[in-house]
Image (spheres, grey):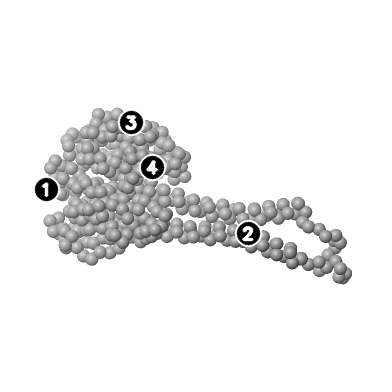
Amino acid sequence: MRKKNLRGFTLIELIVSMGVFIVMITTVSATFASGFASYGNARDLERDVESAQYAMNTLAKYLRTSTIIDSTPSSVVFYDYSSNRCFEYEITGAGVLQARMKDIVSYSQCSVSVLGSPFDLTTGYVSGEFVVDPSVKSPKHMGRVTLYLDIRKSPTSTMSANVQTTVSLRDYQFLEN
Amino acid sequence: MRIKRNVLNGFSLAETMLSMTVLIVGILPILAAMNGGLKHSLESRSIITASGLAQEGVELLKNVKDNNAFAGGTSLAVWLPPSGGPTWNDCRIDFNDNAVSTTGFPVSCGQSNFSLSGTPYVHGGGSGKFNRRIFLSYDSTNETVDCISVVYWGSTYVPSTTMADVRSQCSASNACAYAETTLTPWE
């Protein structure tokens, strides 16, 4: 082995190559980090949207056989003839869709005062509004309820999903009696 | 280590290009995959919103039918007038239209009229992301009305005037979602 042909890298070469290496790794890992963060946010939002959709579908099912008792842009109170229950659904200021209910026997007994304690139906931060067009007995008019929800992970999240549904209140028991 | 070369050599152009190519080929697919996954998640949010709006269209048509049934008449052709019918323009419908039986929407069925915007989503307030269009087909033999509510976004697919076209072309990959129902005279 001839010693004069044994060459390592010079200090300069090492520093330059490490510099290049660091710049590349930093860029690539930053890209990955932001990608994973976006993925995490999207996954959380997906979960929040699923819970909101489930709540919305359940609400729609009840409303389809219900008569509206009372409503505001953030809440609706109704009596479901199908399950003989009085409900209130409310979008709270804290960004949660909540429900309260009570088993009762007739439409006339349904009011906010009889309802049980509220339970949360959604995760994440939910805002939105109810637009209520109640049924009228004379002249006969079948009402409808529209619910619009904006769902995001937190109030400050920029990524959001919107869901909207309208239900026709097929409350013939109310309209024909 | 034994070095055979006795002259000081850097990397050749070919070597450099080869190594850069390998690097790029290695990183690009990973970035592309991540980007694709993110895009897919954004797209799935659009599909959720669109399918909800499509279902809303169908539900509103049922509401129109029920209310017109109260107003009188015995035929579906009166309860849910088909395209070009006397009382109702069948291209679009909104949650906040109360005068369903007589006034309808005084709009033509031009594509520019289908944009949904605002909170809640409604027609006619400028240009929003989603568009919704209603199709009705009255079958006098069976006394039924076939209803399609189609929601599309972007410009990948814009529904033509036939329902068959919607059924065959409208899919999530085309940035489109639709709901279909058949209404009968039964209240």
Amino acid at the residue labelled 1: Asn
Q: Secondary structure at mark 1?
A: loop
Q: Secondary structure at mark 2?
A: helix
Q: Secondary structure at mark 4?
A: loop
Q: Is residue B116 above or below residue A106?
A: above
Q: Quadrant of the N terminus of chain B?
A: bottom right
Q: In the image, which is nearer the foreground, mark 4 or mark 3?
A: 4
Return the chain for callout 3: B
Label 1 and label 2: CA atoms lie apart by 76 Å
Q: Are marks 3 and 2 in contact (CB under 8 Å)?
A: no
Estimate how packed mark 4 is, as few (under 14), some (14 to 19) or many (20 or more) residues with alpha carbons within 10 Å: some
Q: Are marks 4 and 1 in contact (CB under 8 Å)?
A: no
In the rendered image, which residue does mark 3 sit on? B108
* Residue B174: image location, x then y, percent: 46, 42
Amino acid at the residue labelled 2: Met
Q: In the image, which is nearer the foreground, mark 3 or mark 2?
A: 2
In the rendered image, which residue does mark 2 sit on? A24
Label 4 and label 2: CA atoms lie apart by 41 Å
- Badge 4 and badge 3 both on one subunit: yes
